[in-house]
Image (tube, rainbow, N blue to C red):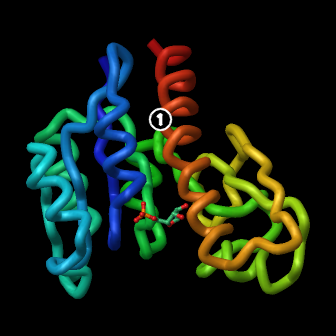
Amino acid sequence: MKRIAVFASGNGSNFQALVENANDVYEVVLLICDCNDSYVIQRANKLGIKSFIFNPKNFDYESMLLNKLNEYKVDYIALAGYMRIIGPVLLKAFPNKIINIHPSLLPAFKGKDAILQAFKYGVRITGVTVHYVESGIDTGKIIEQMPMSIKEKMTYKEVEMEIHKVEHTLYPKVLTKLLREDS
Ligand code: GRF
């Protein structure tokens, strides 16, 4: 059984999907959050998952996070709407063991507000990418992608909802497959 820490900064719907779909391959043992009023913390409390909230203004906060991750014997890190760049301390401690989900078909629409970027551009096909994390933003090796059509009359809200639906099934599925292969 692999022990996962989820890093999230905001709403936390992907965190919740990962927790609710835990199985005989992985369990979510810890939420790491950089903002003390994020909704994801309430979700963790309701789901009975321990959370660790840190102040990113602290000097060398990644070393502090690393101690926490070691304390919880974390095997893998899953980023889910974590709004910070992962630095060298964690990248070195978790080589090929930090995964991210991004709401576009990378390499298209990197960075923030990817769903909106795709919608405004007018693409007919967008989707979701699960990839390894490296030092660049949304640039690591792709693990899996799921395409989704944007039909002509869809509103931005509808596209956003559809993308999140795709994410919530894709992320647990991909992590399960990956971690099963690693055991
Ligand atoms: C998701 O769209 C994810 O792909 C992106 O940030 C968003 C987080 O949403 N990296 P939530 O906080 O999981 O609801």
Secondary structure under tag 1 reads helix
Residue 38: name its quadrant.
bottom left
Counting from the top left corner in percent of width and height, residue 25 is at 38, 18
Say which residue appears at 34% left-offset and 61% top-offset: 12
**Quadrant of the image for the C terminus?**
top left
The answer to whether residue 21 is left or right of residue 74 is right
Res 145 → quadrant: top right
Q: Position of residue 133 (x, y in %)?
A: 57, 54
Vertical order, 7 against 169 (above or below): below
For label 1, the residue is: 172
Q: Nearer the viewer, residue 47 or 140?
A: 47
Which residue is rendered at x = 88% and y = 71% of the image?
152
The residue depicted at 53 percent of the width and 39 percent of the height is 169
Please, is residue 6 above or below residue 171 in the view? below
Q: Is residue 24 above or below residue 8?
A: above
Please rate how many residues cluster around mark 1, counting C-alpha atoms within 10 Å: few if below 14, some from 14 to 19, many from 20.
many
Q: How many marks?
A: 1
- Three-letter amino acid code of the residue under disc 1: Pro
Residue 82 placement: quadrant: bottom left
